[in-house]
Amino acid sequence: MIASDETSAHVARRKHRQLVMHTSTAVCHILADSRADQVLADFLNDARPKVWVADRYSAQNGHSEQGQVCLAHGLRNALLPINSGDKVLAPGLKGLLQRACNIGKRRDRLKDATLLQYLASLAQQLTNLMTLANPHNKDNSSRARSRSAEATWSCS
């Protein structure tokens, strides 16, 4: 499994991207003038990890057998509608993501069957949340993003 994130960095007064990839045994920092997916493809050099955990930026997708949305990024994104007054969907989503993060912290000590039970429970909780009305988001874009993220959640 590789977890990754990126941020801006300035080199010789030019904006670059600092990409950070880490596994349980190593950390790699890459400084590049782009955050295009080719930077990650060059880094991987035809390797294909089983799982890639990242934010929802498209260049970080498709480099592994399975992708997982970074739960910490999802939790941060859930705070925007909460701070905008959403008292229905966002607080429930925040709770669901906090629960998933707590399960993730114990993941290496849990049996596969237990992880599958947690996954089913989280998926049902998300399905229940998606049925709630959200008066603060008429286009339901938060709900649509959550549905698309549901397919990428994995405990394997």
Image: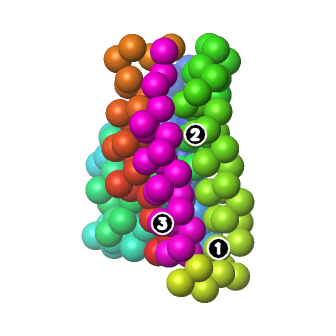
Q: Amino acid at mark 1?
A: Arg
144 vs 150: above or below: above
User: Tag 3, which secondary structure?
Assistant: helix
Q: Closer to the camera, 12 or 124?
A: 124
Chief secondary structure of the magenta portion:
helix
Residue displayed at 59% across by 79% down: 114
The residue that label 3 is drawn on is 120
Residue 107's image quarter?
bottom right
Residue displayed at 38% across by 23% down: 140
Task: Please state the extent of the stretch shown in magenta in the rendering.
Answer: 115-135
19 vs 123: above or below: above
Residue displayed at 62% across by 57% down: 100
How many numbered marks appear? 3
Q: Nearer the viewer, mark 3 or mark 1?
A: 3
118 vs 109: above or below: above
Mark sitting on residue 93: 2
Comes first in the chain, label 3 or label 2: 2
Q: Position of residue 66 (x, y in %)?
A: 36, 65
The residue that label 1 is drawn on is 107
Q: Closer to the camera, 82 or 109?
A: 82
Residue 56 can be seen in this image: no
